[in-house]
């Protein structure tokens, strides 16, 4: 029997192995009974942490400082790539003026991420793999039956061919029989003619013998010779037998005539699981959207916002600063563009790394505090961008001569797809430098807010035009519809900012207008995004505020 448990699996002390556990050392990970606690902490080690057994593994174990080994690291330095630092490090010249974040805060946030990841793995990813496995098992189970149908169809074709060949042979045999009859008739006719002549010759011989026996002078003298007549032999009749000339069997041609076996075709259909929008239950629109929070960024020309997680957002304006705020409005991190130009747009990839485009024809990635060029364009300027549910990157761009626009899909830095024209060769997007915010819907439609065309242009994942939205008639919205930011939620709804009319348009995935959000004192809405809980974040261009709005029940 395991000494650590009884029949009822009651935890036992790891030291004496008999008494029921009472406490727990959170550093040594030992089960301890009351008497053994003293023995355990008397070993000279000064890091023991004894807690009640029910509170085991609740004490955080901080990393030891590299420069100050006698201290634990309670902070991370954001300006030094989030390295662990202790309180002495934070006061040192090396980290003077740096931004620090408490390790506990990062730890708790990461725990929430892990909790969400566990939920996603259990509820979404694992079930998706189970679905894929079931599909493959069904394909394997149906494999023999499918091939039996294939060979049965082939045998049926063979039987049909045999029947057709038998019909051909029967027909040809009938033709031979008919020829044989004709052949017989020809020969019989000539034979009858010859026999008739033979009969005449026989009669002539009888007449001659009669004359030879007769002494009548006149009978002998009056006889007329028949030799000349009978010496004209009839032509010899030579009727050739018909012949059967078999054609050579061309096996390859026969093979192609018999039928065709299509080659084994292995197609891979992408299994898509959007973890950015895990909530697939039906959520109705609120009668009145609610303003949840207002984050003051300090920007004077606030353009774009994108969610890092449920607690933090990235923002940018027409400066070289890209700022990260938490939902309470505290500035968490500031990154400057590598080029010094202001970013046109920002996004977060599936690994949580920041992406931005600027005036240097590049798409840039910020990872661990370091900026790298992900994509560099030739002849085109990147405009706006969005990361898809599968991790691809969608980028809107305009040509150097400012006459053409297009959408390009990238996998990493590799171009996968270009979307520019409809089936008639007509440009899908206005050819200019105006903003064209872009997003992907949960049905994989690609939605572009084309400010210059005054339209939302939606194509399917193959780049085929589905519909255009050019605004909704309203007695209160007097300015032309000129969309800026655009985003989608877990319900497949599309939300786009109408800056001049100070509102948000909500559409369904087929382009049908549902309602406005115009009651949250919005002013010049520009960039928009939605978090995993379908909370809407809206940039107010001139005020520099980001408003968090609840619009779903």
Image (tube, grey):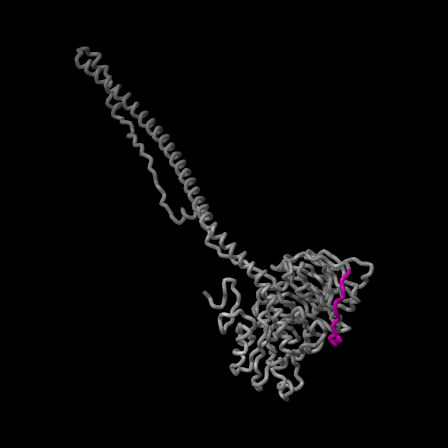
Quarter of the image with the C terminus is bottom right
Q: Position of residue 415 (x, y in %)?
A: 57, 67
Nearer the observer, 498 or 178: 498
Q: Where is the N terminus found, in terms of image quarters?
A: bottom left
Chief secondary structure of the magenta span? strand
Of 530 and 499, which appears nearest the observer?
530
**Residue 455 against residue 219 in the figure, above or below:** below
Question: Is residue 84 part of the magenta span, yes or no?
Answer: no
**Quarter-wise, where is residue 311 in the image?**
bottom right
State whether residue 384 appears in this view: no
292 in the magenta segment: yes
Q: Answer left or right for 402 relative to 351.
A: right
> Which stretch is magenta?
288-300
Residue 253 on image: x %, y %? 41, 48
Q: Residue furthest right?
A: 475
**Tally of numbered discs:** 0
Can you say whether 255 is above or below 403 in the image? above
The residue positioned 68% from the left and 75% from the top of the image is: 324
Which residue is at the front of the view, 173 or 396? Answer: 396
Q: Compared to 477, does 245 lie above or below? A: above
Residue 187 visible somewhere in the drawing: yes
**In which quarter of the view is residue 22 placed?**
bottom right
Q: Nearer the viewer, residue 371 or 295?
A: 295
Question: Residue lying furthest top in this view?
Answer: 216
User: Residue 62 appears at what percent x and percent y?
Assistant: 58, 79
Q: Position of residue 294 (x, y in %)?
A: 75, 71
**On the rendered structure, is 34 left or right of 540?**
left
Q: Residue furthest bottom?
A: 93
């Amino acid at each position: 029997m395991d000494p650590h448990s009884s029949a009822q699996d009651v935890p036992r002390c790891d030291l004496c192995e008999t008494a029921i556990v009472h406490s727990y050392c959170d550093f040594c990970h030992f089960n301890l009974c009351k008497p053994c606690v003293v023995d355990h902490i008397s070993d000279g080690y000064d890091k023991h942490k004894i807690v009640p057994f029910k509170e085991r593994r609740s004490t955080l174990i901080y990393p030891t400082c590299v420069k100050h080994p006698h201290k634990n690291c309670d902070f991370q330095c954001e300006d030094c790539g989030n390295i662990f630092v202790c309180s002495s490090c934070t006061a040192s010249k090396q980290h003077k003026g740096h931004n620090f974040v408490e390790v506990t805060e990062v730890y708790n946030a990461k725990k929430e991420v892990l909790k969400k990841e566990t939920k996603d793995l259990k509820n979404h990813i694992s079930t998706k793999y189970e679905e894929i496995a079931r599909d493959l098992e069904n394909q394997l189970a149906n494999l023999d039956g499918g091939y039996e149908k294939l060979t049965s169809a082939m045998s049926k074709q063979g039987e049909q061919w045999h029947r057709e060949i038998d019909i051909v042979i029967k027909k040809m045999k009938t033709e031979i029989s008919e020829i044989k009859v004709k052949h017989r008739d020809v020969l019989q006719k000539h034979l009858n003619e010859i026999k008739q002549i033979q009969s005449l010759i026989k009669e002539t011989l009888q007449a001659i013998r009669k004359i030879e026996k007769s002494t009548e002078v006149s009978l002998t003298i009056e006889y007329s010779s028949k030799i000349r007549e009978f010496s004209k032999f009839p032509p010899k009749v030579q009727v050739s037998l018909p012949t059967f000339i078999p054609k050579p069997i061309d096996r390859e041609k026969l093979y192609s005539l018999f039928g065709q076996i299509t080659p084994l075709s292995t197609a891979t259909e992408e299994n898509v699981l959007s973890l950015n929008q895990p909530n697939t239950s039906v959520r109705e629109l609120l009668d009145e959207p609610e303003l949840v929070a207002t984050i003051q960024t300090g920007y004077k020309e606030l353009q774009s916002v994108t969610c890092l997680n449920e607690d933090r957002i990235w923002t940018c304006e027409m400066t070289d600063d890209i700022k990260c705020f938490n939902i309470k409005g505290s500035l968490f991190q500031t990154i400057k563009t590598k080029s010094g130009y202001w970013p046109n747009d920002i996004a977060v990839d599936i690994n949580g790394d920041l992406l931005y485009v600027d005036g240097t024809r590049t798409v840039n990635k910020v990872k661990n505090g370091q900026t790298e060029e992900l994509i560099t364009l030739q002849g085109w300027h990147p405009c706006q961008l969005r990361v898809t549910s599968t991790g691809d990157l969608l980028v809107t761009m305009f040509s150097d001569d400012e006459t053409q626009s297009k959408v390009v899909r990238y996998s990493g830095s590799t171009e996968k797809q270009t979307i520019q024209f409809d089936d008639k060769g007509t440009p899908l997007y206005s050819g200019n430098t105006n903003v064209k915010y872009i997003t992907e819907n949960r049905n994989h439609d690609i939605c572009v807010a084309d400010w210059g065309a005054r339209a939302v242009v939606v194509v399917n994942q193959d780049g085929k035009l589905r519909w255009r939205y050019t605004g909704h008639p309203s007695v209160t919205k007097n300015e032309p519809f000129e969309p800026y930011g655009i985003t989608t939620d877990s319900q497949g709804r599309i939300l786009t900012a109408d800056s001049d009319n100070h509102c948000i348009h909500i559409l369904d995935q087929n382009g049908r207008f549902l309602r406005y959000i115009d009651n949250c004192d919005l002013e010049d809405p520009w960039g928009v995004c939605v978090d995993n809980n379908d909370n809407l974040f809206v940039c107010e261009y001139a005020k520099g505020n980001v408003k968090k709005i609840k619009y779903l029940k």
